[in-house]
Image (tube, rainbow, N blue to C red):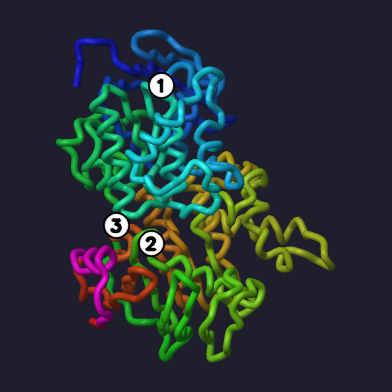
Amino acid sequence: MTTNTPPRLDVRDISKRYGAVQALAGVSFRVQPGEIHALLGHNGAGKSTLVKVLAGLVQPDGGEVLIDGAAVEPRSPRQAQANGVALVDQELSLVPTLSVRENLTLGAARGHVPDPQALREILDSLGLSRVQFSDSVGALPLGEQQLIEIARALSRDARILILDEPTATLSDHEIEMVFRAVRRMAADGRSIIYVSHRLGEILDLCDRATVFRDGTCVGTEDVRGLTRQSIVEMMLGHLPEVSTEVRPPSGEGTLVEIRDLAVAPRLVGFDLAIAPGQIVGLAGQVGCGASDVLRALGGLVPHAEGEVAVDGKRLKLGEPLRSARAGVLYTTSDRKIDGLFLSHSIARNLVSTRLPRVSITGFVDSLRERRAVKRLLELTGIAPGRRRTPVGALSGGNQQKVLVARSLDKDGCRLLVLDEPTRGVDVGGRAEIHDLVRDASRNGSAVLFSSTELDEVLELSDTVVTMFGGRVVSVYTRGAVTPAQVLTDMTHGKQVQAA
C-alpha cells in the first residue's frame, strides 16, 4: 500500500447537525490507494451520515473532502460519481421490472455507459455467469440481486467504492465472490470503504478500520492489531453483557406444532414443535428454506401446504389476517419493502399495526396513541423527542428496532416470528433486540427466528435447527452444540439428527 503519495481520500473535520442531533462532529480520517478501509460504529454513530456526504446525498455543515489531493464538494450523486465515488447502499436500489442490462446502465453519466463486453466481464467476475442481460432483475434470487447492485457500482470505474453492508443477504459462497472482487479491485489500486456490522468480515478482509462513536472518530487502527472484543469496546466504550443462561421453557406442553410444512419447490417436510417460552433459531444460508417457513407461518404464502396448530387450534395457511388473529406475529427481513412506512413518522409506524387499540369509533385517539408510542419508544431506546422523525431518516439499525418493537409489545402474541431480526444492527443494538425477544419468551410467547449469522443463532436460541436445501438437517439444544457442528450442517447438509 503506497504512502508517499497523497491519500486517495482525505476527510477533514466534517460536521453535520440535524436539529438538536449532532450527527458528525469534526470527523477526520484518510484512505490510501489500494486500501480496504472499514468504517465501524454502533447504529447512529455517524457512519451512514458520512457515507451520504461522500456520495453527494447530504451536504456537510463544515469541513472538506479531498480526493487524490484535490478538494471536492459533491452536491449530488451524479457529481460524486464524476469525482470517482460509487456507493452500494445496504438497501437495494434496483428496479425489479427492468432487465439486468437496464439496471446496470441506469444512472450512468452521459458518455460513460460501459460496453456489453465490460459488463459481461464484471458479472462473470462476481460468479454471475448464468445471468443474462435480458433477465428480469425481480425474478432473480435476493443474493444475486445484491451482486447485480455491486456490479453496477463496479461498472462506474470508481476510484473509491463504498460498500454499505454488502453481504447482509448473501450466502457464504456469494460472500466469498464479493470478497474476491473487492480484493481484486484493491490490487488494481482502487480504494474500498467497507461498512459492516459483521466483525469477522472486517478482520478477514480489511486493512485498517476507523471507529465512530456518537458522531466522532474514536480512532483509526491497523486491523491486524484488532480483535472482536477490542473493536466492540472501541465502538461502545465498554463490552456488552452476553447472556449465557440455559433456560427451561416458561410453560409445559406444546404451544405451536408444525407438521409436513411445504412451500414448493423450495421447502419440503418441515416438522417442529415449540413449547411456551421456547426460542428456536433456524440456522442456514440464504435460500436454505428458513424464510419460507417463517413467511408461511405469517400467512404470506398462498400455496403453502401442511398442518400448523397454535394452542391446539389449527391455523389456516395463506391468510395473514388469520395468522395475526391466531397470535402469530411476523416480522420481515426486508424492512424497506415489506416492513416500514419510510416517509411516515416513528410514532405512526409504531402504532400502524395496533390501530384498534388506539382508536375510538374508528378515529385515532391522540391520548391513547401517545401512551402507546411512549411505551414502544422505551422498548426501542429511541429518544421520545424524535417520535415525529420520519423512519426513513433513521439509521438502518434504529429502523430495525422500530420494526421489531412494533410486534413485541402487541397483546395476544403466541408465536413471535422473526426473519433476520438484527439485520444491519450493531453489537449494542443486537443485544438490546435480543433482550426484547427474551422478555417476550419469559412472558410465555414462543419464538421462532431465522438468521444467517452463526453467532446470533448460538447466542439467542434455546434450540437450534439447521437447514440446507429446503430440509431440516439437525436439531440441537443449547449447550449441546458447537459452532463447528452448526456451520458444517448449514453449509453441507446431512441426515437429520437430534441432540
Q: Residues within 10 Å of mark 1 (few under 14, many from 20)?
A: some
Position of residue 346 measured from the top left corner of the image (x, y, whole percent): 62, 49
Determine the residue positioned at 61% across, 73% down. 302
- Secondary structure beneath dot 1 equals strand
Q: Quadrant of residue 35?
A: top left
Question: Of the residues shown, which amino acid type is indicated by label 3?
Answer: Glu
Position of residue 201 measured from the top left corner of the image (x, y, whole percent): 27, 45
In primary-sequence order, the first of circles 1 and 2 is 1
In primary-sequence order, the first of circles 3 and 1 is 1
Disc 1 vs disc 2: Cβ atoms closer than 8 Å? no
Q: Residues within 10 Å of mark 3 (few under 14, many from 20)?
A: few
- Secondary structure beneath dot 3 equals loop
Determine the residue positioned at 48% across, 84% down. 256
Q: Quadrant of the C terminus?
A: bottom left
Determine the residue positioned at 49% across, 70% down. 294
- Above or below, 279 against 126 in this view is below
The secondary structure that dominates the magenta segment is helix
Question: Where is mark 3, residue-wise?
Answer: 241
Question: Of the residues shown, which amino acid type is indicated by label 2?
Answer: Ser
Task: Specify the segment rendered in magenta.
Answer: 483-497
Give the side of residue 143 with respect to residue 414, left or right. Answer: left
Question: Where is mark 2, residue-wise?
Answer: 451
Discs 3/2, front: 2
- Above or below, 204 against 358 in this view is above
- Residue 224 shows up from this direction: yes
Question: Where is mark 1, residue-wise?
Answer: 26
- Secondary structure beneath dot 2 equals strand
Question: Of the residues shown, which amino acid type is indicated by label 1?
Answer: Gly
